[in-house]
Amino acid sequence: MDRPGFTTSLVAGGVAGVSVDLILFPLDTIKTRLQSPQGFNKAGGFRGIYAGVPSAAIGSFPNAAAFFITYEYVKWFLHSDSSSYLMPAKHMLAASAGEVIPFSLVQFPLWESLKALWSWRQDHVVDSWQSAVCGAFAGGFAAAVTTPLDVAKTRIMLAKAGSSTASGNVLSALHGVWRTQGLSGLFAGVFPRMAAISLGGFIFLGAYDQTRSLLLELGKESP
């Protein structure tokens, strides 16, 4: 495995982050309002769903760039044979080093595994669009299984100051949702979340692979 290029990972990661935020920020706003204890309409409905897009896009470039620099370098550092059963663990470690959230621990090992399977089936490395499709499936699955944690995070963020939920205890927030709304409450907004993150995975990981491939190709052509 070749050592990853710092500039390539930085630029490709930044482009991927900006691309996905510009397109998916409104869907994330809708998802958050669906999970609000006030209800969708009282939380704002469809009003102002594009508010904050420019600042989010500007902030996403350095965040995504830092994530992919860390992810690629940790993968390179922990490199082992691609057929090894330790490969998923390597990708989990790389993802957790870049961004310590359960979502990444599910999405990135699955993305890498799907790419490896597709590459094996067609006997050559996946193209960027195929990487994007793998990213969409991985993102959708990760979105579904981590929805309860996302609901808890939303409830904590929207809780009134001084309330037990506002203390930031995730288990307490999950128990409160389960007690009042049951399973449907824990998975509130799951379909918009899956749709948004599947599309986000397609754009984010596809844009990253495409930009990275272009930059590496340009690097080879440079004298």
Image: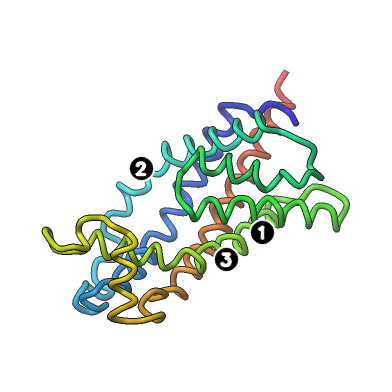
Estimate the x, y position of residue 194 in percent, counting from the top left. 50, 69
10 Å crowding of disc 1: few (<14), some (14-19), many (20+): many
Asked which secondary structure carries label 2, the reply is: helix
Q: How many marks?
A: 3
Q: Earlier in the sequence, mark 1 or mark 3?
A: 1
Q: Which residue is mark 3?
A: 141
Q: Residue at x 36, y 42 (%)?
A: 58
Whether the residues at callouts 2 and 3 have beta carbons within 8 Å, the answer is no
Q: Which residue is mark 1?
A: 134
Residue farthest along the right direction in this orientation: 123
In the image, which disc is placed on residue 153? none
**In-image side of 115 versus 156 (left or right):** right
- Looking at the image, is 34 positioned above or below residue 102? below
Q: Which residue is mark 2?
A: 58
Q: Amino acid under label 3?
A: Phe
Whether the residues at callouts 1 and 3 have beta carbons within 8 Å, the answer is no
10 Å crowding of disc 2: few (<14), some (14-19), many (20+): some
Q: Amino acid under label 1?
A: Cys
Q: Along the line of sight, which residue is nearer the eye, 60 or 15?
A: 60
Where does the N terminus fall, quadrant-wise? top right
Where does the C terminus fall, quadrant-wise? top right
Q: Along the line of sight, which residue is nearer the eye, 65 or 95?
A: 95
Q: Residue at x 44, y 59 (%)?
A: 23
Q: Earlier in the sequence, mark 1 or mark 2?
A: 2
Real-space Cα separation, disc 2 to disc 3, in angstroms: 28 Å
Whether the residues at callouts 1 and 2 have beta carbons within 8 Å, the answer is no
Q: Residue at x 66, y 59 (%)?
A: 134
